Amino acid sequence: MPCACQKNRKQYEVVTESGKVVFTSTSQPTADTVAKRYPNSVVRPQGETASTAAK
C-alpha cells in the first residue's frame, strides 16, 4: 500500500508559454527558480488552468 503522507501537500507546476508543464515541485521557491529558465513561463498550483493561475 502506498504512503499517504504526500496526499495533502500542495504542488506547484512550471508551465511554459505554450502550455506545457515542464516541472513540478512541492516547493514554490524551487518552482520559481526553475521558471526563470523558461521565458514567459508561469508557476501555478497543480491542477489549476492558466486563466485561473493568472488571476
Image (cartoon, rainbow, N blue to C red):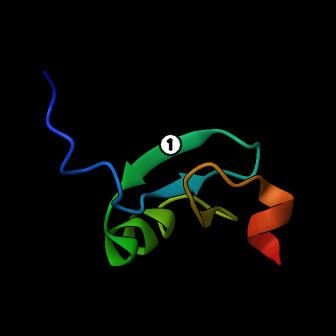
Which picture quadrant has residue 52?
bottom right
Secondary structure under the numbered disc 1 in the rendered image: strand
Position of 35 compared to 34: left or right?
A: right
Position of 28 compared to 40: left or right?
A: left
Callout count: 1
Residue in the foreground of this view, choosing between 31 and 52: 52
Position of 2 compared to 7: left or right?
A: left
Q: Residue at x 62, y 48 (%)?
A: 47
Residue extending furthest toward the top = 1
- Dot 1 amino acid type: Val
| Quadrant the C terminus occupies | bottom right
Please provide percent x and percent y for residue 17: 74, 52
Q: Residue at x 64, y 61 (%)?
A: 41
Whether 41 is drawn above or below 1: the answer is below
Please provide percent x and percent y for residue 34: 40, 63
Residue in the foreground of this view, choosing between 22 and 46: 46
Whether 20 is drawn above or below 17: the answer is above
Q: Residue at x 18, y 50 (%)?
A: 5
| Quadrant the N terminus occupies | top left
Please provide percent x and percent y for residue 9: 34, 60
Please provide percent x and percent y for residue 11: 42, 58
Position of 26 compared to 31: left or right?
A: left
Q: Residue at x 45, y 73 (%)?
A: 32
Label 1 packing within 10 angstroms: few (<14), some (14-19), many (20+): few
Residue identifier under label 1: 22
